[in-house]
Image: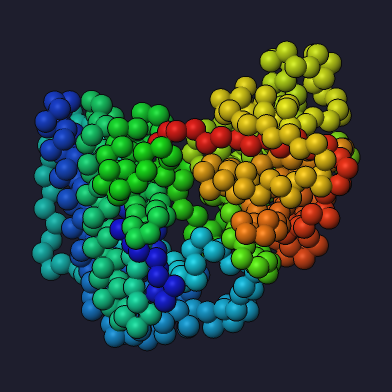
Amino acid sequence: MVALDRSAVILRARGSLELRCLLDGTDGSHVQKAVSGAFERVRAGVTSQALVFRVHDSPMFIWPNKGCQATEGIAETTACKDLLQRLRSGEPDGGKRSSKKKDKRNGDTSIINIDLLMELTEPGREAGPTLTRREARHHLAQMALPMDCVVMAGMDDGIGDALSRLVGAVCSQLTDMESVVLRHISGTSLLVPQPFHFLLPEPTGLVTLVYPAGVPDTQLESFRKEMHVRFALPEDRPYLRRANANHFLGEPFKDAYLRNPHLALSHPALEDAKPFLVQGVYSYHHYMQDRVDDSGWGCAYRSLQTICSWFQQQGYTERVVPSHKEIQQALVDVGDKPSSFVGSRQWIGSIEVQAVLDQLLGITSRILFVSQGSELVNQGRELASHFQREGTPIMIGGGVLAHTILGVLWSETTGDIRFLILDPHYTGGEDVQVIIDKGWCGWKGMDFWDQRAYYNLCLPQRPKAI
């Protein structure tokens, strides 16, 4: 468990360690003993002088079990902040980052990425080799263990102490991997253990769990329940599914969509007002993405895709975000549209968004009707309650336009309100600076809405599940 601290640094070690296990039979107890022995040999290697840490994207190699011997003049007593400064001085921008582009889920915590390596050469031996021959039938089980370990260190901590704790974390993760492999062993078939990091509510912070590859989240519910009890987590929403895994600063996503661009915004000044915002992670879907020219008709589709991405990235569904045609087919399947609707360029609204969420994801939604835009000022309490309770993005449609509401800034005493809008009508590239500067994601006042237009709001409800 790692508690995030803005005045600290995360050391993250990643790499593969080879597990080789020679099985002489298929007896269950024998296989388990052989697997445990193989893990013990890997742990012994990690605590030996053969372990090497390479600071990622640098020429710096460190032998943590050789008194922190290093190639770049690093000593055991070198402060983590000094190592971090040295790494930053080698960046093209000198380590300076735009404050608007920081990932606020990780605060200002800095990360030192480390490659986990093992020396293959050993000092020569004076004695000559001895050859023996043994004939027997064996089964060789071999896998690359995908190590991914993190520890937190203070900026003034010596790098030697921090790396020593990182070595301990690698050993602990190997023990967790051993438990997962043994728990899910089938004959001589071994599942690859995969580590995932989860950023849990304070004071817990960052925790790492190991799951077996190929076993879906639905079959790991009993284990997650144990962990929810262990970490005192609510039992009505997922925190520990694979989709909930923490995304570290600078780590690329597998797709090209922007995540949570609203985090680059500051709250506007509004007397006696409190912010009520979307909870969790979503992707920004807008016009012209996915090689689909939907400018002029696809805004509600894009808002729906943003909502679907929220449910996917919170772990409520493993279904990918639906395409325009899949959305249209879902409406045909529920009897809302004729078959000719598929492949058309026809608009949809909040009612259709509600139907698709139910059909494709099994998500129920509330519909809020507002007879004219000027009355949205009266919905502050309702919207604030939604973001507090459900935390899901809201699709709002009125006239010929659709938008996504990510939150409100609302004063209970004065009734003043501002709306945090994610605009699906954007047609440019995935540049968060442009999106913020041009107002495609930003705070809007009441003058943003058509005062006389009729509006429907689709408020998706969060399922109770872990």
- Label count reads 0
In depth, the one of 70 and 172 nearer the eye is: 172
Residue 357 visible to an observer of this rendering: yes
Q: Is residue 160 above or below residue 333?
A: below
Residue 392, percent across and down? 58, 43
Residue 214, percent across and down? 40, 32
Which image quadrant for residue 242?
Answer: top left
Residue 293 visible to an observer of this rendering: no
Which residue lies at the image location 77% right of the left edge and 45% below the top edge?
375
User: Which quadrant holds the C terminus?
Assistant: top left
Residue 112, percent across and down? 43, 70
Q: Is residue 74 above or below residue 242?
A: below
Which image quadrant for residue 15?
Answer: bottom left
Q: Is residue 214 above or below residue 151?
A: above
Left or right of residue 266, residue 455 in this image:
right
Which image quadrant for residue 348?
Answer: top right
User: Which quadrant holds the N terminus?
Assistant: bottom left
Which residue lies at the image location 18% right of the left edge and 52% below the top edge?
41
What colouring style does the render use?
Answer: rainbow
In depth, the one of 326 and 52 nearer the eye is: 326
Left or right of residue 271, residue 211 in this image:
left
Which residue lies at the image location 54% right of the left edge and 41% below the top edge?
390
Residue 3, percent across and down? 35, 64
Left or right of residue 95, residue 333 in this image:
right
Which residue lies at the image location 80% right of the left edge and 21% below the top edge?
342
In depth, the one of 61 and 282 nearer the eye is: 282
